[in-house]
Amino acid sequence: MEEERERIEQKLRQRYLGEPRRREGEEGKPRLDRDTMALRVAREFEDGMVVNLGIGIPTLCVNFIPAGRQILFHTENGALGFGPIASPEEVDIDLVNAGGQFVTPKTGMSFFSHDESFAMIRGGRIDVCVLGGMQVSERGDLANWLLPERGIGSIGGAMDLAFGAKKLIVVMEHTTLDGKPKILDKCSYELTAPRCVDLIVTDIAVIGVTEEGLVLKEVAPGWSAEEVQALTEPKLKLAPDLKEIELM
Amino acid sequence: MPANKVVDGFDGAVRDIFDGATILIGGFGVSGGCPSYLIEALSRQGAKNLTIVGNTTGLGRELKKMVAKYRVIPDWHEDAGLLVENRQVKKAIAAFPVSASPVLVAPFEKQLRAGEVEIEMVPQGTLAERIRAAKAGIAAFYTPTGPGTIMERGKELRVIDGRKHVLEYAIKADFALIRAYKADRLGNLIYRGTSRTFNATMAGAAKVTIAEVDEVVEVGELDPEAIVTPALFVDRVVVRPEEGRTRIVQRIRKEEQL
């Protein structure tokens, strides 16, 4: 009972305080942490873009906007152009993002109803959406909502975002907690949307989804293309300018 | 349209909600924007076999206490989970019926596993549009969200402009319980921040719309250019007690920090 309680408390800390998860059977090779993955994703944001961030690692991207770029953040629950995550002193219960995190006000922000928010999404007004993923297939199908071990899940706003955003970036750990590939020939879980992913950023690689298949563009420091391939089910093509992920 | 929609007390505001009613519940799943006092009154009123429609199915009281250790949840916060705990719900139409976290097993998930409640899961944008469609007198619409997924099953598909679409129907509801910031006596509403969310979408989308607000002001005090929900979408307005008002919540928060 006491053990169960501590496990629950730990999960809550991971969820709400961002405490890192310990991964079982992790070998010595260092992988990117959640912040560094978010940093890499945020480099894709160009000046003036409208960006929607999903729950989890995606929300961290707000902390890593490249200098000199103005990004307009959109959240499904009806706000555009809000500021970074609020400190405890700044909490306003009427100012949250879709992950339920409190955010800060910013000059020029606006609020709108839920139907209008999804009019923006379906209407093609979101330049980039960043979502977490459980599985991504060779052709860019995404599965990220059904929790297979529980046989249940919540679609939330992910499906509309996956169908509606101009560009979809999936950020996730490269393998499952027990070391199995999450990038697969074909997703075995229920899909969020077919053929929707444009770019995959993981803790060991950056992979583009193209008509010709998956293209390995970058590898984490210390990782070779062969090592990344060994943890990826579909065959990866190597980008002509394959390079290391820059950490700074 | 009556010139004064303000009713006295939450119990009176929900008195005529009947067994088997379909109820839109506003908010997003967090404290801001949740019609907590109306939900609490409905739990006391006791109507059963309800179909609830909203983004989430709520945490309920037990989980709320746990989560409150890690994020700001005011004491007065109640969500749809209270109605589920109270066995008043037979079905939910929701985008986020269960938590992504395996440890946050809310009352709805427990009852779902036991086969005691039904779920109709709907992508959030489709949910918002199905509610908006009902408000706008639109029977159904084709949306590009869903083809090639579980969401197309049993539904009519049609290719429009070279893209597959799914036919989705309006959600017809009996009552909408919503949270707004201020109202005037006519029922014009304004909201605050991200608390607008599903509340403004649901206002006017049911036969009867009941709004809980912080404050009722004189007619003319709300800037007509800034009114979000025009009065004709609102049937009843009821005012929160002092401790549930945003200004007070923010002040208490500040004092806690000092």
Image: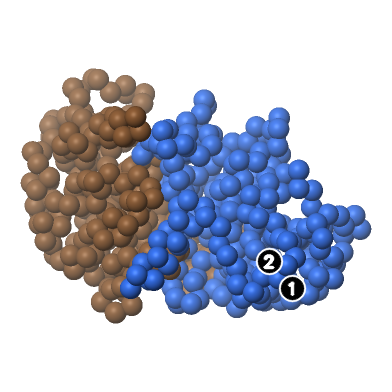
Q: Are marks 2 and 1 in contact (CB under 8 Å)?
A: yes
The chain coloured blue is A
Q: Please state the chain letter of the residue tagged with numbered disc 1 in the rendered image.
A: A
- Report which quarter residue A31 is drawn in: bottom right
Q: Quadrant of the C terminus of chain B?
A: top left
Total numbered circles: 2
Q: Amino acid at mark 1?
A: Leu
Q: Position of residue A41 (x, y in %)?
A: 68, 49
Whether discs 2 and 1 lie on one chain: the answer is yes
A138 to the left or right of A177: right
> Which residue is located at x 74 percent, y 73 percent?
A231
Colour scheme:
by chain
Q: Nearer the viewer, residue A93 or B3?
A: A93
Q: Position of residue A60 (x, y in %)?
A: 58, 47
Q: Position of residue B56 (x, y in %)?
A: 36, 58
Q: Which residue is mark 1?
A: A231
Q: 10 Å neighbourhood of mark 1: few (<14), some, or many (≥20)?
A: some
> Which residue is located at x 45 percent, y 56 percent?
A13
Q: Amino acid at mark 2?
A: His
> Which residue is located at x 53 percent, y 60 percent?
A159
CA–CA distance in space, label 2 to label 1: 8 Å
Q: Which residue is mark 2?
A: A174
